[in-house]
Image (tube, rainbow, N blue to C red):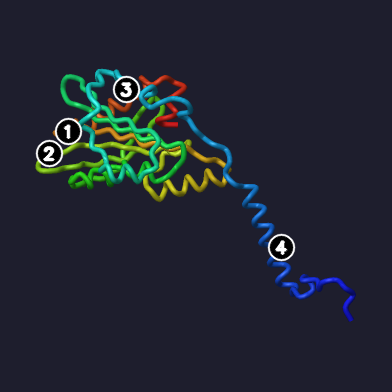
Amino acid sequence: MSDGFPPDPMAKLSRREVVAGLAMLSAGAVAAARKPDIEVDYLGKYKLDEVIPEKIGAWKFVSTSGVVVPPKDQLQQALYSQLLTRVYYDGQAPIMLLVAYSPTQNGFLQVHRPEFCYTAAGFDLSRFAPHDVRIEPTRSIRVNTLTATREGAGEKLLYWVRIGDHIPLSWAQQKIVFAEDNLRRLIPDSILVRVSTPLTDDSLAMAKIDQFVRDMVAATAPPLRRVLVA
């Protein structure tokens, strides 16, 4: 006999279904509580051309053209934030600098990695190797180096990606450090720094690039150096 009230839906649920439902609710609550909400934005209100000096050691900024960049269609598909391209000259050989910044980790930086934009420009890539650059008397950073050649000419390249306080060497490591920061509720910013010079002698080219990187970090205002190297 009906008492005039609708049937209780919980009465038809098994114990297993109730436990599973409560578990899902708990998991959802934990996920919501741990959702990343702390932004790490080392660039802040600054522009890249305010951070990177026009005079770096013996090098002076001479041009914005001559730097290998991705095709326009790839740039249009990227989530654009800030991009700096400069050519520096010390009276002997040019240094090409590309700096790509994003307030969050996304596909934008990938577009500017040498493996993408140099290949798209018709270069063959070889001699991939990790490399340590001493940026301060007691501090080094580990970066990637490679050689790009096309029609008998080429460039020696060095680059690194900073995500938050990390400088991962590979795309897989980038994903890992990004996930680790997310677990700490951090939303890290990210930057790619790429330095290259025409390829002559490999060791001389690397020595020149190393010196440029050291001078660039030293010439950057101390509070803003973390934009480049954390």
- Quarter of the image for the N terminus: give it: bottom right
Residue drawn at (29%, 18%) of the image: 55
Write down the residue under mark 4: 22
Residue drawn at (20%, 31%) of the image: 66
Which circle's residue, 3 or 2, is located before the other in the chain?
2
| Cα distance in 3D space between marks 3 and 2 | 27 Å
Return the mark for residue 229.
Answer: none
| Cα distance in 3D space between marks 4 and 2 | 65 Å
Q: Where's residue 119, x and y in %? A: 22, 47
Write down the residue under mark 1: 198
Which circle's residue, 1 or 2, is located before the other in the chain?
2
Element class at badge 4: helix
Give 56 or 5, whichever is nearer the viewer: 5
Q: In the rendered structure, which amino acid carries the disc numbered 1? A: Pro
Query: Which marked residue is nearer to the observer: mark 1 or mark 3?
Result: 1
Element class at badge 2: strand
Quadrant of the image occupied by residue 4? bottom right
**CB atoms of marks 1 and 2 within 8 Å:** yes
Write down the residue under mark 3: 215
- Quarter of the image for the C terminus: give it: top left
Q: Where's residue 41, x and y in %? A: 49, 32
Residue at far front of view: 4
Write down the residue under mark 2: 153
| Cα distance in 3D space between marks 4 and 1 | 63 Å
Q: Residues within 10 Å of mark 2 (few under 14, many from 20)?
A: few
Element class at badge 3: helix
| Cα distance in 3D space between marks 1 and 2 | 8 Å
Left or right position of 56 against 183: left
Which circle's residue, 4 or 2, is located before the other in the chain?
4
**CB atoms of marks 4 and 1 within 8 Å:** no
Left or right position of 37 against 71: right
Query: Which marked residue is nearer to the observer: mark 4 or mark 1?
Result: 4
